[in-house]
Amino acid sequence: MNTRYDFVRHLLTMAILLPVTASNAWSQRPRQVRPPSKPKPTPTKAEPSPRQPATMRLASLAEGAFGQTGCLIEAARLCSQARYADALEWLADAPVDNQHWASGYLRSLAAGLTMHPVSRGDKLRGRILAVDFSPDGTLVAAGATAGNVHLLEAETGRHLHTLYAHRKWVRRVVFHPKGNILASGGDDGKVRLWQTQVGLEILSVPQQLTPIRGLAFSPDGDTFASGSLGGKIALWSTHDGKLISTLAELEHGVGALAYSPDGKVLAAMTLRGQILLIDIATGKLLSMLGKGQASDEVSIAFSPDGALLACGHQEEAVVYEVATGKEILTVDNPSEGTCQVAFIPFRQWLLIGRDHTLSLWDPAGREMVSSMTGRCGDIQSVAVRADGSRIAVGSPGAVDILAAPVGSPYRMLGRMESQGRRLSFAGDRLLAGNMSGIWAWDLDADRERSFPHPAGRVLAISANGERAAGVNVDRQLLVWNVRSGEVLYKTDPLKKPPATGTFTHDGSTLLVGEWDESIRAYNVDKQYRAWSSGSLGAVPLSLALDPRGGLLYAALRNHSVAVLDMNNRQVVQRFPLRATAVACSPQGALAVAGSDRAIRIVSAADGAILKILRGHQALVSQMAFTADGNKLASASADGTVRVWDPSAGVELVSLGRESTWFTSVAFSDDERHLVATDRNGGVHLWENDRVWSERTQTWLATEQLASSSAPRDQPTGPPQKSPAEKPAMETGR
């Protein structure tokens, strides 16, 4: 499966078109404003055609080594190194017009994967060795070497309280799951519980003989565990501070503790690099992980689903599978400090803080997602808010609050063996059919698999994803169960393979457009051919069912749309539209893609044109409505997938890559995802709530990101259209 950085690497290969000396000179130039010089006449160059391949387009953009193009090349290089914060600074000088596809893609990528500052609490005494967010995310607690615990507002960094907690260094601060209690542990061997609203101590446990290095609340908040440098792991009651049990007394000192999300397992990491998984109920040792590498400081964290366990020490950061103990990711630490680890809940990314560098890693893909250097002090501790939107970083005398990356809105799920033709969603499972079978993706787990298929070309997939139809090498029409591959229905050999097909909404009947200019219905459950429409006067190219009743719309090769009543199998209307594809919304709105590259929203009653959607530069391959009918997606041979508001007749956003011919498109049932397939078998996914806005085109830069990356003397909103630009919508007569 291709990684999310394949496209950026592709941009970088195009950078070799620049002279090496010129590109080096550009990247090493001093960043200063040059005095204006007398403009010299330059020959006018033609704007590259939108139909040009991506390589030719970037080559034309990169004809010179200076100016805005140089910023694009440098930004692409930084994105390939996951240095998105630095890339945004270079993109501030790059073209902001969304017509520059490379600039738009890099902006969306960098905006989605950048950790940018939100607030800072500074002038704090000592090094901040521990930080934690309150469960509601409004407060940050910071434990310092001065023995104090500072309470800060997360969004502003404003200092609220100072708790004079310990006589020696504060090693751990942990919020209670309900948020009104804070626990602190220090080198003086004490554990204290505080009321955060007024900053008063409410409880303390008997002083230990050795410093406290590990501290963690259970998920239900009834108990908390402490680990000392003497190797003792104790379980305490939150209500009265009494000792419940001593879980273990180890030979080596305990450096960090973490509860599993279900509260059944306690992970303890010693300063010798050993990780012990202890059953809370029985106190038994379940398993032992780690490489036995000694370290003065350690950190440990469970993933939000409890399947992974990350640990950090002075040598490296390691991620293990809890069930098998298998090591799945190792990140070396080139600096002298300790790797501080935490998980981002959004995608279960691993956050690693070390020296002056924050980096994000994808344990599943074993690759770095993002990196930021030099924007925080010497990192002593890290924490992530419960919703994953904020990161707290403790350093000498300060706490930095950063906005966590939300991730790139675009992913390439994979590449099938041949051209994608049909798409279907079944919950969080995506099915894609092509010339060689059915492929499936679990979008939440990002897993891919192929299903057994008795036919070659896939003709249709049912709405629930349980059935598929296709044609085998003997020209037999087959319907089979997607999961098992069992053939449910098979016809006699046909003279020609069907031109198009679709299932009814319950999946019981298959409708097929034949080359003899008819439409045939096959009852899959009863295994017989139900009916035939007779000749329609032309070959059907695309079929769409009206969910409200028994109407079937067929785009015919003779440039018309036939409306077929499936109850009496008669053509009841014909619309004189030059159609290549049709789609029908659940509310009965009809979208017709024409040979003139425009999409018409048509009244299903009389065929009157309500809106005309213009923007595509080539034929539209397929269209799909959302479940509520408020949005329409179209896939085109011009290399774009466009999302429209059909009732207003306006384009919401244009997505895609200009070297790609998109062949099919579909929305997920919950409208969270938009998926398209291309002519080369690629399956592309966008997250809807982050790639488009209902009012205007956007490339995901939030107002804060836009204002921080754009030049100060320019507005930060989306680019305004010039009066000469052609409107994206025309109203039908």
Image (cartoon, rainbow, N blue to C red):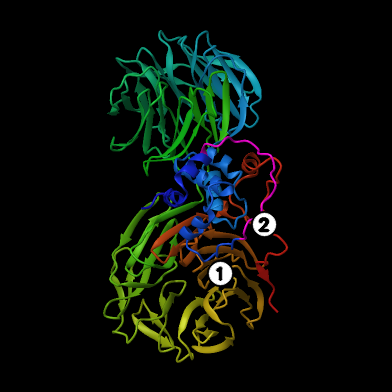
**Residue 300, position in %: x, y?**
40, 27
Q: Is residue 558 above or below residue 342?
A: below
Judge from the rendering whether residue 600 lies leftward or rightward of residue 500; answer left or right: right
In this rendered view, identify the residue nearer to me: 706 or 249. 706
In this rendered view, identify the residue nearer to me: 116 or 259. 116
Quadrant housing the C terminus? bottom right
Judge from the rendering whether residue 325 lies leftward or rightward of residue 411; answer left or right: left
Q: Main secondary structure of the magenta part?
A: loop
Amino acid tagged 2: Arg
Dot 2, how many residues are within 10 Å of its Cα: few (below 14), some (14-19), or many (20+)? few
- What's drawn in magenta, residue-wise? 27-44
Number of the label disc, if any, that sits on residue 74: none
Which of the two labelled residues, at mark 1 and mark 2, occupies the earlier sequence position? 1
Residue 466, visible in the rendered structure:
no
In this rendered view, identify the residue nearer to me: 196 or 253. 253
**Residue 662, position in %: x, y?**
47, 66
Judge from the rendering whether residue 31 lies leftward or rightward of residue 663; answer left or right: right
Reply yes or no: does residue 232 show up in magenta: no
Dot 1 and dot 2 residues touching (CB under 8 Å): no
Dot 1, how many residues are within 10 Å of its Cα: few (below 14), some (14-19), or many (20+)? some
**Residue 417, position in %: x, y?**
33, 63
> Which is in the foreground here, disc 1 or disc 2?
1
Quickly name the residue at label 2.
695
Q: CA distance from mark 1 to mark 2?
A: 23 Å
Q: Residue at x 41, y 7 (%)?
A: 209
**Residue 512, position in %: x, y?**
41, 81
Q: Residue at x 37, y 84 (%)?
A: 529
Quickly name the residue at label 1.
617
The secondary element bearing badge 1 is classed as loop
Amino acid tagged 1: Gln
Q: Is residue 653 above or below residue 509?
A: above
